[in-house]
Image (cartoon, rainbow, N blue to C red):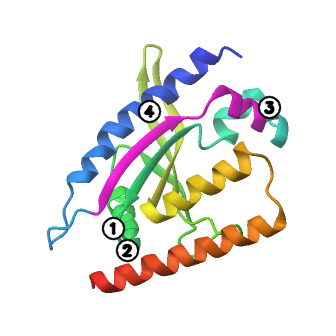
Amino acid sequence: MEWPTFFEPYEQAVSELKAKLGYLKHGQLKNGARPVEAVTGRVKSQASIEEKIVRRHLHEDRLALDLQDIAGLRIMTKYIEDIYTVVEWLRKRTDFTILEERDYVVNAKPSGYRSYHMVIEYPVQLYSGEKKVLAEIQIRTMGMNFWATIEHDLRYKHGDIDEEMAKKLTEISEQTFALEQEISDIRG
């Protein structure tokens, strides 16, 4: 695998999408509120891809199809309801095609993970011509992002977590979501 060549369209897609979606921070609702707090992006590391190849028994020739999150964007909001405002904004865009949507906000994963995921097909213009790449956009609140960052660090960077810690993390996720719902209620 020629990794620099492989990563090129994904790096371009993340760069372009960060710039384009970064403008969402300036979008306002009728009441003047700005739903988007931050937009970040990354290209999955070679080491992470190689680990997934082994763990999921993937073939290098199919990575562009089997890994939908090589290019990843994250849009963070203050409030839960703002997630769905951003989803509607993204659905109206014509510069990419939405292939799949998964709502883990309402339907949290068993671990407690919450976020709204969109898999898109985005065209990049290379010297060799247009190439369509898959990218994943995650839309979540800052609270959901805090929990996901900590959980990911504990689970994947410090080794597997035991059942008691997993249960505690799920409880913390539920508490965080309940707090965010209360904040949304206060907001009105």
x, y (%) of residue 25?
Answer: 26, 52
Q: Are marks 2 and 4 in contact (CB under 8 Å)?
A: no
Which residue corresponds to mark 2? 81
Q: Which SS class for mark 2? A: helix
Q: Determine the CA span between mark 1 and mark 2.
A: 7 Å
Q: Which mark, residue 59?
A: 3
**Which residue sits at x=27%, y=85%?**
188
Tag in front: 1 or 3: 1
Q: Identify the image quadrant of the N terminus.
A: top right
Q: Earlier in the sequence, mark 4 or mark 1?
A: 4
Label 4 is placed on what type of residue? Ala
Q: Determine the CA span between mark 1 and mark 3.
A: 38 Å
Which residue corresponds to mark 1? 85
Q: Earlier in the sequence, mark 2 or mark 3?
A: 3
Label 2 is placed on what type of residue? Glu
Q: Are marks 1 and 2 in contact (CB under 8 Å)?
A: yes
